[in-house]
Amino acid sequence: MIASVIGGGSWGSAFAIHLGRLNIETKLWIREPDVYEEIVRYKENKTFLPGAVFPSTVTFFNDLEGIISSSEVIFIAVPSRFCRETYKKLAPLISSKHIVVSLTKGIEEDSLKRMSEVQEEVFSPYLKPCIVALSGPSFAREVAESHPTAVVVASKDMNLAKKIQNFVSSLYFRAYSSEDILGVEFAGALKNIIAIATGISDGLQYGSNTMAGLVTRGLAEMMRLGIKLGARMETFAGLAGIGDLVLTCTGKLSRNRYVGYELGKGKNLDKIVSSMKMIAEGISTTFSVHQLAVREHIEMPICEQVYQILYQKKNPRTALKDLMSRELKDEYKL
């Protein structure tokens, strides 16, 4: 099968490199003209993934129409805020023969929809493609460097999930399959909020006790919302849940943890964001999840404090004190 990867950021580039190393003919679409020219010239994404060289099996395009018709599997790795716009461009070009795989971990702000839901809405006037989500603990740089990585591939159609599982797996990249696409997508988005919280804790120079508490109770909040919306509990105990949560909360390559760390040190959010080349999905996801929690009447105290820090400029130290002084709860309840 021929594959296309839509998105020339760090994750899209790393995934195209991974596919190319499997000797899969891979076409990478890059939106930014300067990044496109750079990659064509150097066979390397010096802007978003410096040092990782593309194999000869990967070719580069800045025209969507030129790659979709010849591809059977389309991997989409663009930030959630740009997904609807990208899907609209893809919609007239795709057909029922295509398998569309979302690599995006986010929730759309206005609609509060997961990426697969946005795809279904945008693609529905046309021939509906098969939709899959791939998520799990997978820093782009480590995938590009062939570090052993395990992820989960999810679809409502288990046969389809297994097809993509076999397509992307290798000796250093192991995929598991799941039918719980709702849980996999929510877990991938929600863990970014908790990563911001743990980054704030580190920035405030708190220790491992604080980190453990935030990760554990953060997982409880993720499960609370996910299960209410129809996800399976076991999904949060796996790679898409606790696996990705631990990675994003502790790994130094985590953009969301970095945002929290800088906030904890007292830096301004706008200045933090403007200094970053890549988008930290947890910022917009925090807004969306706040809206979802209100709508569903779900108690999410850590996510709520992160929301207040990001959007109401609450002092991070005060936010942590407010978390610790809440009414005591039964520890065994989600």
Image (cartoon, rainbow, N blue to C red):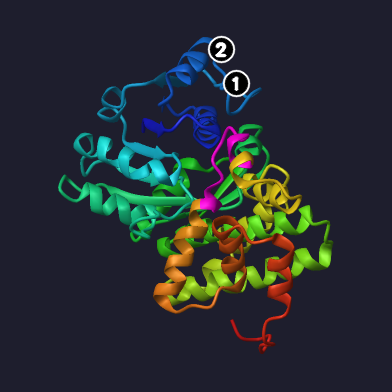
Comparing labels 2 and 1, the label whose residue is closer to the camera: 1
Which residue is located at x 32 percent, y 45 percent? 84
Quarter of the image for the N terminus: give it: top left
Q: Quadrant of residue 49?
A: top right
Q: Is residue 303 above or below residue 3?
A: below
Residue 235 in the image: state x and y as whole percent: 52, 67
Q: Quadrant of residue 145?
A: top right
Q: Amino acid at mark 2?
A: Tyr
**Disc 1 marks which residue?**
46
Q: Going 76% across and 67% down the picture, which residue do you hit?
A: 212
**Vertical comparison of 240 with 65: above or below:** below
Say whether residue 8 is left or right of residue 92. right
The amino acid marked with disc number 1 is Lys
Residue range corresponding to the magenta coloring: 272-283
Image quadrant in which the C terminus is located: bottom right
Side of 13 relative to 200 (left or right): left
Residue 53: x %, y % from top left: 60, 21
Would you say residue 67 sits in the magenta stretch?
no
Do the numbered discs 2 and 1 sit on residues whose CB atoms are within 8 Å?
Answer: yes
Q: Is residue 279 magenta?
A: yes
Q: Residue at x 49, y 34 (%)?
A: 12
Q: Nearer the viewer, residue 74 or 33?
A: 33
Residue 193 seen in this snapshot: yes
Element carrying mark 1? loop
Q: Position of residue 245 (x, y in %)?
A: 63, 59
Residue pictured at 39% horizontal, 41% vertical: 82
**Residue 42 has which mark?**
2
Rendering coords of residue 238 (x, y %)? 59, 64
Specify whether residue 179 is in view. Answer: no
Q: CA distance from mark 2 to mark 1?
A: 8 Å
